Image: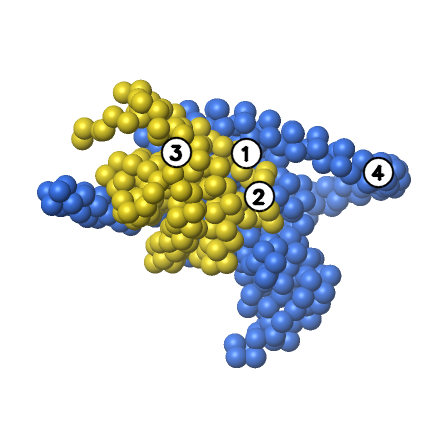
């Protein structure tokens, strides 16, 4: 019995040291190992089917439980659609005009420097502790760590781990992501957006380091500023400027640090994501090929 | 051999369910971890030595889907399972109360282990989520423990591993 206990203790110590070393080694790396990649690819193929099935079932149930709401929404959307169609016609005219003027000024269109890769979500990750999800594109499509993930509604998060045809995205609601943001109305105030959760576990974000005299107010839209990430690893222009992040719901003043923080409600509903886009800078692709 | 296959396929199945099905039964963003409950229940019934290896293997699978860090879940699961194994020595295994309470405290233990390691390498994580997930885990552990107890009472599951 004594021997067995020793065997147990020895195993625990050996394994603990191994794991702690692995943790120290792995958190800085740029891509996952071959073994992880292989296992990931295998499991993901099954998992994707499960996840899609479940999200379809969920959508189906939600449709019936909120049928009257859906009908009302539908009517409102039809009305809105009409409005938007007329606006779209205006937009085309303006766009043509804009392009003409841009050419005249030889202005480089910034958004054309990026590729947008459409991805499906095939599962959740991060255990129960971090808000992360798995998408079905990876290194083969030019995705790398730190790249930004968006939907049509706005900013979603950042890539934290990349396999050959899958990658892990950490959402904005984690505190680990830092993106520099700009207040649309005042234009000059640049701050750092980080994830934030209020006491109800509501997924919000917070814009830090705004100057004390900033005129930020409730309802202002926050956009990305296009300046590299704060973490120091950020390459300038890793993501385009002007991606919508959210709108301000509250402003708080930090007297100690003489600055203002704005609490931001993201435009994206992180619980209802199905399809996302990864923003890949084009010049980075050129370097590789 | 049949035992190993059973345990391995249960691990994979619960891992997939954890990533694909559990998010849809989450309440306000808090969700249980089926795989963790499975290994805890198994360790209580089969004691530390087997629990340790199951914990390590399941943890490595969980690490696959945990940010970019490998080893963190394996480490936390290993310790949790060994503790669960020691709890299992002194209790009547057909009674469900102690295993359910242990699941609660071990979930908190695992949460804190993960929290501390993440903190050390500069990744922040909410603390409140640990407690509420643990509470949800406790509820789910009632059917899970009953299931594992039933599974372990089968004849082919009784054979001991030879490591």
Provide the residue designation for mark 1: B21
Q: Give the distance between the C-alpha atoms of the residues marked 4 and 1, in whole angstroms.
A: 27 Å
Mark 4: secondary structure: helix
- Please state if A91 lies on the left or on the right of A218 as rendered: right
Q: Give the distance between the C-alpha atoms of the residues marked 2 and 4, in whole angstroms.
A: 25 Å
Marks 1, 3 in one chain: yes
Against B146, residue A203 (above or below) is below
- Please state if A152 lies on the left or on the right of A180 as rendered: right
Q: Give the distance between the C-alpha atoms of the residues marked 1 and 3, in whole angstroms.
A: 23 Å
Chain letter, colour blue in render: A
CB under 8 Å between callouts 4 and 1? no
Q: Give the distance between the C-alpha atoms of the residues marked 1 and 2, in whole angstroms.
A: 9 Å
Chain letter, colour yellow in render: B
In the picture, the disc for residue A210 is none
Q: Nearer the viewer, mark 1 or mark 3?
A: 3
Q: Give the distance between the C-alpha atoms of the residues marked 3 and 2, in whole angstroms.
A: 26 Å
Q: Quick one: A66 or A191, which is closer to the camera?
A: A66
Q: Residue at x 69, y 71 (%)?
A: A215
Provide the residue designation for mark 3: B149
Provide the residue designation for mark 2: B26
Mark 3: secondary structure: helix
Query: Across the whole image, how many numbered discs are drawn on residues?
Result: 4
Provide the residue designation for mark 4: A68
Mark 1 and mark 2 lie on one chain; the one further toward the N terminus is 1
Against A44, residue A88 (above or below) is below
Q: In which chain is the residue bearing label 2?
A: B
Q: Quick one: A216 or B104, which is closer to the camera?
A: B104
Marks 2, 4 in one chain: no
């Amino acid at each position: 019995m004594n021997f067995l206990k020793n065997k147990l203790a020895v195993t625990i110590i050996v394994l603990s040291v191994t794991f702690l070393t692995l943790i120290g080694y792995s958190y800085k790396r740029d891509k996952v190992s071959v073994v992880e990649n292989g296992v990931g690819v295998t499991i993901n193929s099954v998992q994707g089917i499960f996840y899609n099935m479940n999200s379809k079932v969920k959508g189906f149930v939600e449709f019936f439980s909120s049928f009257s709401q859906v009908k009302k929404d539908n009517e409102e959307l039809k009305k809105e659609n009409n409005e938007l169609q007329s606006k779209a016609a205006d937009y085309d005219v303006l766009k043509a005009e804009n392009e003409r003027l841009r050419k005249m000024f030889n202005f480089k269109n910034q958004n054309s420097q990026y590729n947008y890769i459409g991805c499906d979500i095939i599962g959740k990750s991060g255990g129960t502790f971090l808000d992360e999800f798995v998408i079905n594109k990876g290194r083969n499509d030019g995705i790398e760590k730190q790249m930004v993930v968006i939907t049509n509604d706005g900013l979603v998060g950042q890539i934290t781990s990349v396999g050959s045809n899958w990658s892990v995205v950490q959402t904005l609601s984690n505190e680990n992501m830092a993106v520099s943001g700009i207040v649309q109305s005042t234009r000059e105030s640049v701050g750092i957006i980080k994830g934030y959760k209020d006491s109800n576990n509501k997924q919000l974000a917070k814009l830090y380091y705004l100057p004390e005299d900033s005129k930020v107010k409730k309802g202002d839209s926050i956009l990305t500023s296009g300046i590299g990430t704060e973490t120091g690893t950020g390459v300038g222009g890793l993501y385009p400027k002007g991606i919508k992040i959210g709108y301000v719901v509250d402003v708080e003043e930090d007297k100690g640090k003489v600055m203002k923080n704005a609490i931001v409600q993201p435009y994206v509903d992180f619980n209802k994501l199905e399809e996302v886009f990864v923003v890949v800078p084009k010049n980075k692709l050129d370097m590789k090929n | 051999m049949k035992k190993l296959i059973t345990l391995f396929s249960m691990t994979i199945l619960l891992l997939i369910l954890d990533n694909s099905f559990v998010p849809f039964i989450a309440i306000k963003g808090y969700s249980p971890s089926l795989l963790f409950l499975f290994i805890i229940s198994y360790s209580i019934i089969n004691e530390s030595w087997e629990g340790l290896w199951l914990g390590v293997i399941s943890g490595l699978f969980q690490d696959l889907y945990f940010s970019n860090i490998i080893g963190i879940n394996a480490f936390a699961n290993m310790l949790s399972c060994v503790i669960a194994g020691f709890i299992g020595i002194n209790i009547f295994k057909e009674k469900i109360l102690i295993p359910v309470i242990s699941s609660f405290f071990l979930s908190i233990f695992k949460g804190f282990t993960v929290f501390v390691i993440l903190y050390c390498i500069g990744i922040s994580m909410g603390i409140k989520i640990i407690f509420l997930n643990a509470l949800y885990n406790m509820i789910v552990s009632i059917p899970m423990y009953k299931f594992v107890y039933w599974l372990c009472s089968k004849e082919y599951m009784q054979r001991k591993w030879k490591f």
